[in-house]
Image: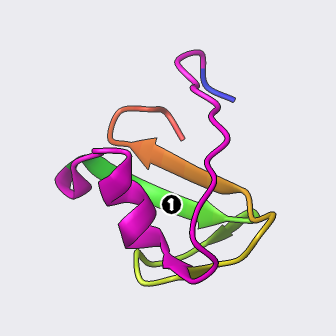
Amino acid sequence: MPANTNLDEVTMQPITVLRELINSLRIPQYAIWLVKVNGEEVTLDQNLADGDTVEIFAAGDGA
């Protein structure tokens, strides 16, 4: 993982879209370079399920 990695565990409603998670974390969408769910590159419209691992990379993260 990159040196500036932040790991947080978030409790969400059962039917949550990745975009809603990002908005709740107050991450500006224009700053996002890449998102992965369970290691797979996805769009911000990806549905999330209990236990999913979400990785959000900002431009310049070196990902």
Q: Is residue 28 left or right of residue 43?
A: left
**Residue at (76%, 70%) from the top-left corner?**
50
**Residue at (57%, 71%) from the top-left corner?**
13
Residue 60 rendering spot, x and y as whole percentages: 35, 33
Q: Is residue 20 left or right of residue 30?
A: right
Dominant SS type (magenta)? loop
Does residue 24 belong to the magenta stretch? yes
Task: Looking at the picture, tell me which residue is in the foreground, 23 or 37.
Answer: 23
Magenta range: 3-30
Residue 5 rendering spot, x and y as whole percentages: 58, 25
Q: Is residue 52 left or right of residue 15?
A: right
**Residue at (54%, 41%) from the top-left corner?**
63
Residue 41 rendering spot, x and y as whole percentages: 59, 71
Above or below: residue 55 compared with residue 60: below
Residue 8 rendering spot, x and y as whole percentages: 62, 35
Q: Amino acid at mark 1?
A: Val
Which residue was labeled with disc 1? Answer: 35
Does residue 55 belong to the magenta stretch? no
Element class at badge 1? strand
Q: Is residue 7 left or right of residue 17?
A: right
| Quadrant where the image shows the N terminus | top right
